[in-house]
Amino acid sequence: MRMNAVNMDELRAGISAFAARGLRLDMSRGKPDAAQLDLSLPMLEMKDGFLSEDGADTRNYGDPLGIPEARRLFGQLLGAPASQVIVGGNSSINLIHDALTRAIINGPLEGDLPWSRVDGVKILCPVPGYDWHFSICATLGLKAVPVTTREDGPDMDEVESLARDPAVKGMICVPMYGNPSGITYSDAVVERLAGMKTAAPDFRIIWDNAYCVHHLYPDEARRDHLKNMYDACAAAGHENRVLMFTSTSKITFAGGGVSAMAASPENIARQAALMTYQLVCYDKVNQLRHARFLPDMAAVEAHMAKHAAIIRPKFEYVLGVMERELSGIATWSRPRGGYFICFRAPKGCAKRIVALCAEAGVTLTPAGSPFPGGYDPDDSVIRIAPTYPPMEELKQVMELFPMAVKLAAAEKARRENG
């Protein structure tokens, strides 16, 4: 790309003029906006009492694995029998953290060596990926090993090669509308993950299916489809390999949702036994209100179509501006669901772009976040989260962002060309 000094001066002036507005705009996290949260307000009306379908009073102790109707709902979301579901609190990340902690302290199954007694336990992490996954690994002393992501999911030749190391105990990933890649794993990738040979017999895939119903387009032809991972593992003779997670955090209330884990009967029995003295039960009143508000998949689909109607215009607006202003300078994903656009700036420019935006009053996700340790070897990937700002604020952000990209790219070109 060639850009003369006059253009760079104009870009600097444009960014300075934007900064002079004194705006403070936040596009750093993939949060629902207020209009999305309002969709679930009717759920708060508990008009039909507090008894679950098995006659239990949800206000009282009991049902530590979740009420029947909530387990059934999450079984449909995750593709597993209700009996193989544990319903948790508002955070699937909490369930993931706890499941990994139990593996470290107790071993995944009865008789398995606790991971704490294995030197240098490693977890495979497709990148660009979810920064909280990497932080969980770091907190628990697990080495996050980056794996290249391709158009159909993780590079399976790389995954299979790394899994020959007995210290590689698992993989953690967002398999549908990935954070931030937007990629959904192909059937072939799912089947290879389910069937591959691993040196560690207790290898676990943490299947963080956070966006399993978060389609931007309601028609089947324009949405992604993910093969059932539990079925694939069972068919390959590795039924215990996968632990599946999701939540309603971006379906109902981000701060008041419900989460769940689904897995094989043996895994669920193990997790349930270890949870016995960790908690009496999760919030069953919240489980009941969710199950009544979303009694089946038809209700979920109808509700998520309302979400899509709110956020789809935001994605389309951001993508339209990028296409108009940044074609030939950078590349980006065009997701059909989820919460993020994966922007790839010219190498060596991501940190500069984020800094320019911050100086002008716009907070983006820190450059490097989609990689373990915050280190992007190309300094290229920026996670764009269009959902949270109201459209009028999003339009202001997208005035600034192309100027920052162009200036950072021009500065890099000038350095390289002298």
Image (tube, rainbow, N blue to C red):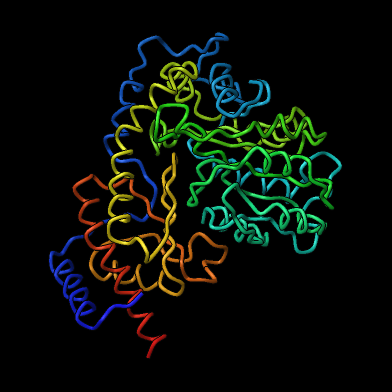
Q: Residue 388: x and y, percent?
A: 31, 46
Q: Residue 410: x and y, percent?
A: 32, 77
Where is the N terminus found, in terms of image quarters? bottom left
x 17%, y 70%: residue: 14
Q: Residue 16: x and y, percent?
A: 17, 73
Question: Can you tell which quarter of the image residue 230 is in?
Answer: top right
Answer above or below: position of 162 versus 216.
below
Q: Which of 175 and 68 is in front in this view?
A: 175
x 42%, y 36%: residue: 250
Q: Which of 255 and 81 is in front in this view?
A: 81
Where is the C terminus found, in terms of image quarters? bottom left
x 25%, y 51%: residue: 394
93 relative to 118 in the view: left or right: left
Q: Which of 109 and 72 is in front in this view?
A: 72
Q: Which residue lies furthest to the right in this view?
A: 111
Q: Which residue lies furthest to the bottom in this view?
A: 418
Q: Residue 44: x and y, percent?
A: 34, 23
142 relative to 127 in the view: left or right: right
Image label count: 0
Question: Can you tell which quarter of the image residue 108 is in?
Answer: top right
228 relative to 61 in the view: left or right: right
x 33%, y 38%: residue: 312
Answer above or below: position of 70 versus 243.
above
Answer above or below: position of 409 versus 199.
below
Q: Nearer the viewer, residue 266 or 222?
A: 222
Question: Can you tell which quarter of the image residue 322 is in?
Answer: bottom left
